[in-house]
Amino acid sequence: MLRHGVSYGEFAEITREVYVASADKDFPVSGRKQSVSRIALLTGLNRKEVARLRQQEESPAGQSSYNRGVRIISGWSRDSEFQDSSGKPAALTADGPAPSFAELVKKYSGDIPVRAVLDELLRVGAVRLDTKGSIHLKNDSAYVPGNDKDAQFQILGASVADLLDNLDHNLDAEEGMTRLQLTTAYNNLSRSAVENFRSMSHEDARAFLKKMDRWFAAHDRDAGDVPSNEDESRMRAGIGIYYIEQEMEK
C-alpha cells in the first residue's frame, strides 16, 4: 500500500468501511433491519461514524463509473451492432445512428451523458481518438483502467473480496456445495519457460473469459433478452483468473 501512496489514514478509512459493510451484511438479527446502534456495537465505531459510512456506501459514486465502463466495453466487444466485418470492436463515430459511441452508451449505460462517459474512458486509457475523431477501443478483453490508481484500487478491493468470500464459503460448505477453487503453480522454472507460460496463459485466459462474458450477456437481465418465465430472484455470479509469478531463492 505504501508503494502506491496509500497513507495510514486512507487504509484506516478503507478498514472502517469494510467493518461497517460486513456488520451490516453478515451479522443481521433475524427478522429485523440492521440498525446504526447495532453496527456501532459490533464494530466499536461510534454511531455518527457508522451513519456516515453507511450513507457513503449507498452513494452510487463509488463503483458506478467502473461498472459503467465494464458494461460499455463488454457491449462494444460482443455486440455485432458495434463490430466491424472481422468481428472486432469497430471504430465508432461520436454521434449519429448505430454504430456510434452515443448509441453504444445509450444501449449499455442508460441516460448517462455521452461526453462524461467518453472523458472517463479516455482518462483511464481504455479508448483513443484518431485524427478524424473516431473512437477506438484499446483493449477488447476487459475494462482495465490503466491510468487510474483509484479505479485500480477499486478493482483490487473487489477482486480480493470475491476471493476471500469464496475461501470463507468453502471452509463451511456442505458436501457438494463448495465453489470452484483451483490453482496450479511450480517453483523451479527457467525464466524463458515462465515467459512462455505468461504469454500462453494470458492468451488462453482472455479467450476463456470472453466465452464466459458471452454467456453472461445472454442471461443477464440488463444485457440480454431473458425469457419472461425466469424467476424473480437476483443473484451475482462470475469467475476470476489471476496470474502467479515470483522470484525464488536459488
Image: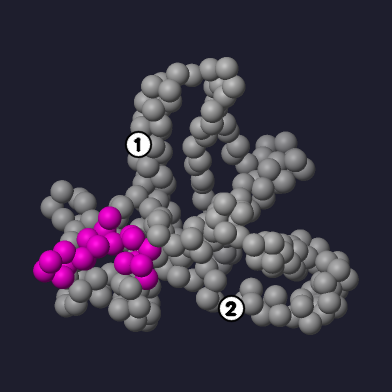
Residue 30 visible in the shown view: no
Residue type pointed to by label 2: Ser
**Residue at image point 82% right, 80% down:** 47
Q: From this view, report whether residue 194 is shown above or below residue 117.
A: above
Q: Residues within 10 Å of mark 1 (few under 14, many from 20)?
A: few
Residue 45 image position (x, y, % from top left):
82, 72
Visual colour scheme = one colour
Mark 2 crowdedness (10 Å alpha carbons): few <14, some 14-19, many ≥20: few
Earlier-in-chain disc, 2 versus 1: 2
Q: Secondary structure at mark 2?
A: loop
Picture quadrant of residue 120:
bottom left
Tell me which residue sits at (62%, 47%) in the image.
163
Amino acid found under the numbered disc labelled 1: Glu
Could you say which disc has been placed on residue 59 in the image? 2
Check residue 203 in the rendering and tell me which mark sits there, or answer none.
1
- Report the span colored magenta: 120-138
Instruction: Check residue 126 for magenta coloring.
Output: yes
Whole-percent x, y for residue 70 in the image: 41, 61
Real-space CA distance between mark 2 and mark 1, rounded to the nearest whole angstrom: 37 Å
User: Looking at the image, is 93 positioned above or below residue 177?
Assistant: below
